[in-house]
């Protein structure tokens, strides 16, 4: 399985990912990633990250997930999402964005890691 792309830089409203164009929010998985468009699944800050948001990461083979809650921890994680991951025995890390980037980059290359990253609030 291909390594997950490394996050090269993160600042308020901007992320740089190895092999991808710079953007604001990203979904990353083993072998690739793309911008994370919240409107696709109806995600809002509350109730937060939806089961549908993590489905694509799992479909791409991620067995460890890193979910960022934003720079100011405004983005929540829907309890249904955590329950889905528990049922599938998926290791999950939930953290503020800069901490989430560190966790993700430490796992990239050694585990099939996926992540959802929100670079603002």
Image (spheres, rainbow, N blue to C red):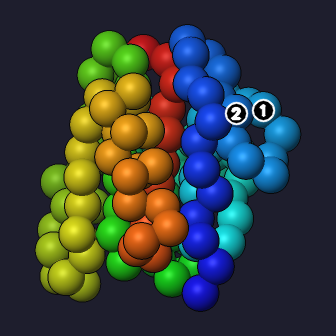
Residue 79 lies left or right of residue 20; in this view the side is: left
Place of residue 14 in the rendered image (x, y in percent of width and height, measured from the top left): 66, 21
Place of residue 90 in the rendered image (x, y in percent of width and height, measured from the top left): 25, 75
3 relative to 28, above or below: below
Q: Tell me what residue is drawn at x 58 percent, y 79 percent.
A: 60
User: Mark 2 or 1 closer to N-term?
Assistant: 2
Is residue 80 shown to the viewer in this render?
A: no
Q: Nearer the viewer, residue 88 or 8?
A: 8
Q: Tell me what residue is drawn at x 84 percent, y 39 percent.
A: 21
User: Do the numbered discs 2 and 1 sit on residues whose CB atoms are within 8 Å?
Assistant: yes
Is residue 38 shown to the viewer in this render?
A: yes
66 relative to 76, above or below: below
Residue 52 lies left or right of residue 39; in this view the side is: left
Q: Residues within 10 Å of mark 1 (few under 14, many from 20)?
A: some
Place of residue 18 in the rendered image (x, y in percent of width and height, measured from the top left): 73, 47
Whole-number angstrom distance, CA of label 2 to CA of label 1:
5 Å
Circle on res. 85 = none
Tag 2, which secondary structure?
strand
Q: The C terminus lies in which quarter of the figure?
A: top left
Q: Which residue is mark 1?
A: 22
Residue 16 lies left or right of residue 85; in this view the side is: right
Tag 1, which secondary structure?
loop
Place of residue 7 in the rendered image (x, y in percent of width and height, measured from the top left): 59, 42
Q: Which residue is mark 2?
A: 16
Q: Tell me what residue is drawn at x 49 percent, y 40 percent.
A: 117
Q: Residues within 10 Å of mark 2 (few under 14, many from 20)?
A: some
- Dividing the picture into quarters, in which one does residue 99 lie? top left
Q: Nearer the viewer, residue 23 or 8?
A: 8
Q: Nearer the viewer, residue 8 or 38?
A: 8
Q: Nearer the viewer, residue 28 or 76?
A: 28
Q: How many marks?
A: 2
Residue 56 lies left or right of residue 43; in this view the side is: right
């Amino acid at each position: 399985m291909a390594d997950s792309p490394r996050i090269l830089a993160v600042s308020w409203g901007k992320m740089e990912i190895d092999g991808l164009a710079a953007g604001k929010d990203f979904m990353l998985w083993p072998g690739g990633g793309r911008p994370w468009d919240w409107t696709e699944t109806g995600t809002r800050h509350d109730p937060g990250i939806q089961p549908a948001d993590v489905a694509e990461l799992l479909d791409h083979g991620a067995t460890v997930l890193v979910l960022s809650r934003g720079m100011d921890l405004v983005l929540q994680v829907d309890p249904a999402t955590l329950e889905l991951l528990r049922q599938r025995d998926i290791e999950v890390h939930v953290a503020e964005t800069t901490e989430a980037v560190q966790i993700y980059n430490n796992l990239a290359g050694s585990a099939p890691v996926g992540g959802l990253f929100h670079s603002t609030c």
